[in-house]
């Protein structure tokens, strides 16, 4: 246990290496009684570059006289090595006990992303920017190297709409922090996306006889209406500007949910009209940002119309020069069959889009944390041999553990979910509570599915498999008593414990809320900054229930 630590950096330290040192120091200061000293520390931590280890990789090794070295292939590797060192170390009021993990570690997947769905007044949309920025820094320590955000056009009359400009400023703030921690900015456009004020005469068709697009905002344009493609390109050019300034590295082009057009000339959208729009947008964006990677999404392909994957494969066989990646993933954990059977269209690398938020109930995260290691492992196993990485879809901080599971899978595809859960618990809470909290997390996954019923005026939330609820609650309370103060007060612990408390209260009250459950739901609302959140992301407090309906 060291009370004084001397930290050394390479003489040519880049801003990212200095940032890694800053995060190391911040974590030690916040969690332990140790302090950094300019010389003669009881422990020396040395951050250094050692090219040749493999892209973004690092080695942690012992040096002479109580020195531990983080040797990194490159500047990102320094940050990821610092993250690993922090996760394997122990913290107490007496000092800092440096982790015993030694060895070389190199990420196996190159695209290790997260997608913040910046809408619905969720955490990413409404929390103070500095909280979102800190969260981005914490993701980077787990090896996340790209972050996607969304400017949802249909909320705004035009790009000049003050609300649109406010959103752009916020997204730039998130992405500038991302760059400071070595994260490549990304965003997504619906290929035929339109503003609320889009010209009605240019709009797409969403109901064509028996063909009907279920997720459509009716502001999208039809690329086959004269003038619509020019309008789409003008809007693209306009809203690319702030993303160019933010250092955009990936641009997703998206077909559906919302989006699409089912008119005769666009049909079948994914293999026809979508590609015509997407190619023009992609070529324009690549002219504006020469190193930009285009990610073509296949979301909901072949769900409404057959032939979309086949149309894409044919188009990519003819000319794939405007696409860099194909994004493939399906709803409810179903990986699409087409690339498994036929390979990726055009032989392009595939990246995933796993669902980590919308699990177990229609209010995502409304009951606290939703850890789902078994489900995440199952999702990963389906695509891990095919994928070069991915961007889990995130609606908030309630699925923090699920994010870190994918960060772990992308780093080492064969690492088990359980091993990552244990590392997470030891780092974020305490190595002393790994057994009981890992067991409680397993129960919280099994007990999450629930409904929303109504008995007269009183809502009722029956839980499908309530058998182990009291055990999880007891395990979490027992761990709570053993945690250091910094961990016990942290939001990551509170959302886990609150989930245990709420479920226990529901069980004892025939699945009605109690006063204690209401207090817990209020605390979740504060943690998520969900006071104005939409129905899918607002904890079901009394106030929220007045505007929500059973789903
Ligand atoms: Zn059309």
Image: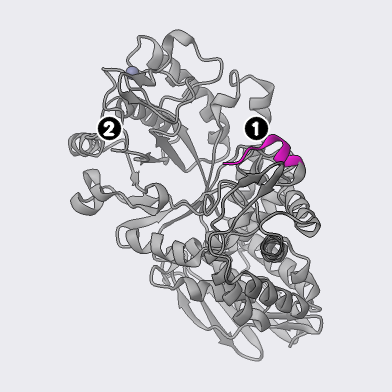
Residue 269, magenta (yes or no): no
Q: Where is residue 64 in the image (x, y as percent from the top left)?
A: 61, 90
- Residue 501 in view in this figure: yes
> Is residue 58 depicted above or below 96 in this figure?
above
Q: Where is residue 389 in the image (x, y as percent from the top left)?
A: 40, 56
Q: Nearer the viewer, residue 429 or 442?
A: 442
The image quarter in which residue 263 lies:
top left
Residue 545, magenta (yes or no): yes
| Side of 332 where 242 appears, left or right | right
> Is residue 272 depicted above or below 78 in this figure?
above
Labels 1 & 2 near each other (Cβ < 8 A): no
Q: Mark 1 points at which residue?
A: 167
Which residue sits at x=48%, y=61%? 406
Of the image marks 1 and 2, the number of the one nearer the N terminus: 1
The label number, if any, that marks residue 305 in the structure image: 2
The magenta span reads 543-551
The image quarter in which residue 62 lies:
bottom right
Q: SS of the residue at dot 2?
A: loop
Local packing at callout 1 (Cα closer than 10 Å; few below 14, some 14-19, many 20+) is some
């Amino acid at each position: 246990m060291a009370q004084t630590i001397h930290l050394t950096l390479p003489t040519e330290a880049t801003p990212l290496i200095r940032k890694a040192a800053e995060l190391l120091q911040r974590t030690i200061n916040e969690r332990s009684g140790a302090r950094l000293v300019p010389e003669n520390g009881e422990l020396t931590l040395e951050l250094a570059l050692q090219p040749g280890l493999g892209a973004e990789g690092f080695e942690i090794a012992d040096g002479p006289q109580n020195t531990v070295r983080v040797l990194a292939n490159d500047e990102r590797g320094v940050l990821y090595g610092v993250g690993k060192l922090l996760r394997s170390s122990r913290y107490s009021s007496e000092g800092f006990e440096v982790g015993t993990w030694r060895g070389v570690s190199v990420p196996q997947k190159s695209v290790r992303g997260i997608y913040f769905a910046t809408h619905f007044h969720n955490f990413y949309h409404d929390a103070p920017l500095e909280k979102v920025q800190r969260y981005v820094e914490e993701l980077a320590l787990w090896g996340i190297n790209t972050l996607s955000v969304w400017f949802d056009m249909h909320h705004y009359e035009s790009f000049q709409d003050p609300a649109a400009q406010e959103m752009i400023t916020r997204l730039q703030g998130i992405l500038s922090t991302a760059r400071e921690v070595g994260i490549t900015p990304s965003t997504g456009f619906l290929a035929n996306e339109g503003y609320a004020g889009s010209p009605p005469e240019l709009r797409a068709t969403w109901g064509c006889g028996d063909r009907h697009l279920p997720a459509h905002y009716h502001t999208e344009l039809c690329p086959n209406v004269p003038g619509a493609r020019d309008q789409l390109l003008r809007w693209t050019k306009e809203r690319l500007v702030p993303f160019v300034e933010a250092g955009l590295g990936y641009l997703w082009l998206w077909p559906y949910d919302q989006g699409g057009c089912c008119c005769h000339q666009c049909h079948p959208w994914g293999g026809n009209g979508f590609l015509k729009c997407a190619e023009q947008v992609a070529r324009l964006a690549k002219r504006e940002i020469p190193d930009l990677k285009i990610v073509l999404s296949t979301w909901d392909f072949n769900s409404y119309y057959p032939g979309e994957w086949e149309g894409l494969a044919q188009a990519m066989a003819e000319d794939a020069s405007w696409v860099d990646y194909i994004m493939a993933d399906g709803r409810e954990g179903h990986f699409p069959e087409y690339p498994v059977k036929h390979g990726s269209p055009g032989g392009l690398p595939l990246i995933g889009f796993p669902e980590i938020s919308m699990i177990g109930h229609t209010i995502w995260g409304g009951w606290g944390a939703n850890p789902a290691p078994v489900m995440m492992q199952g999702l990963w196993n389906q695509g891990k041999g095919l994928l070069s990485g991915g961007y889990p879809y995130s609606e908030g901080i309630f699925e923090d553990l699920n994010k870190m599971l994918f960060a772990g899978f992308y780093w080492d595809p064969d690492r088990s979910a359980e091993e990552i859960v244990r590392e997470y618990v030891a780092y974020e809470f305490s190595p002393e509570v790994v057994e009981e909290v890992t067991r409680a997390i397993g129960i919280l996954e099994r007990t999450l599915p629930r409904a929303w019923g109504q008995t007269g005026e009183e809502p009722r939330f029956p839980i499908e498999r309530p058998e182990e609820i009291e055990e999880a609650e007891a395990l979490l309370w027992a761990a709570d008593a053993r945690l250091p103060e910094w961990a016990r007060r942290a939001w990551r612990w509170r959302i886990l414990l609150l989930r245990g408390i709420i479920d226990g209260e529901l069980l004892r009250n025939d699945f009605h809320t109690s006063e204690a459950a209401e207090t817990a739901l209020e605390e979740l609302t504060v943690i998520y900054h969900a006071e104005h959140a939409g129905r899918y992301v607002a904890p079901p407090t009394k106030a929220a229930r007045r505007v929500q309906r059973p789903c």
